[in-house]
Amino acid sequence: MDDPGTTAAALPKRFYQRVDVADRAGGFALLLDDKPVRTPGKKQLLLPSRGLAEAVAEEWRAQKERIDPAAMPLTKLANSAIDGVKGREDDVIGDIVNYAGSDLLCYRAEGPRGLVEAQRAHWDPVLAWAKSALGAPFVLAEGIVHVAQPQASLDRLREALKAQAPFGVAALHVMTGLTGSALLALAVALGRMTSEEAWKAAHVDEDWQIAQWGEDAEAAARRAARRRDFDAAARALALLKD
């Protein structure tokens, strides 16, 4: 669970026996004891692909005596896509593009040498891909002083994002927020990187610090929780095709 202070007794009791997926107009519905599940916004939980619907259903089947939302990242993503993204795609895409305007990959360390080389190894290939495949070159800077990115490049990213369905936009928004990089998220969506490669690239700086000074237990737990949500979003992108 994200909150270590939350006890099992504070979680809602499991109230259903059977979980099924059913074809419905507009998608695949999740049924608990033949009753359709609804989002927190009271909309029916309809998934756009059977693969994603079955994966969400497995999260519900895996719950024991109590329902732990922290163990259901795909369900959380589906709720977000339906309640927060569908019908607001342009706003959410705009938020992702804003991240790209100060993308993690564009801000380089001045030293030490090992960190500089690690950033180059993980980040330069992604920037080269954005330039060649998307027609979106990005400007680099050393340190934390903001550097403006070409508007044409941001527009090309916006075009690529608009090709995504609402669930894809929701997944990309989650991945962008967790990594600080719209370019890494889009590289996973378009098959340029695996989720593992993108996660490693997003944590070059953090991993360098860990190698030097070790890792705090609480920081490790927070990172594991973020990784769970990142992997769920990447998995959702793949399942949208099933």
Image (cartoon, rainbow, N blue to C red):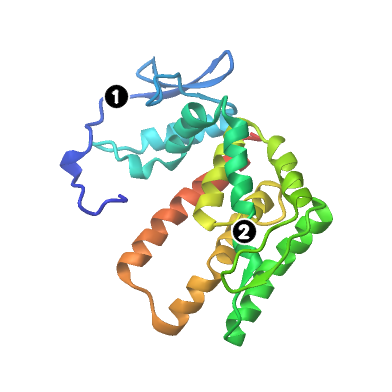
Residue 11 horizontal side relative to residue 35, left or right? left
Q: Is residue 43 visible?
A: yes
Q: Is residue 235 visible?
A: no
x and y percentages locating residue 156 in the rendered image: 76, 46
Q: Is residue 14 above or below residue 236?
A: above
Residue sitting nearer the eye, 187 or 180: 180
Sort mark 2 into few (<14), some (14-19) or many (20+) by Cα contacts within 10 Å. Answer: many
Residue ID at (46%, 81%) = 211
x and y percentages locating residue 69 in the rendered image: 33, 39
Residue ID at (50%, 54%) = 178
Q: Residue furthest top?
A: 25
Quadrant in which residue 117 is drawn: bottom right
Between label 1 and label 2, give the one nearer the viewer.
Answer: 2
Residue that label 2 marks: 103
Q: Identify the amino acid type marked 1.
A: Tyr
Q: Is residue 1 above or below residue 115?
A: above
Q: Secondary structure at mark 2?
A: loop
Q: Is residue 48 above or below residue 169?
A: above
Quadrant that contains the C terminus: top right
Residue that label 1 marks: 16
Residue 241 horizontal side relative to residue 206, left or right? right
Residue sitting nearer the eye, 3 or 153: 153
Residue ID at (71%, 62%) = 126
Q: Earlier in the sequence, mark 1 or mark 2?
A: 1
Q: Residue furthest bottom?
A: 113
Q: Identify the amino acid type marked 2.
A: Asp
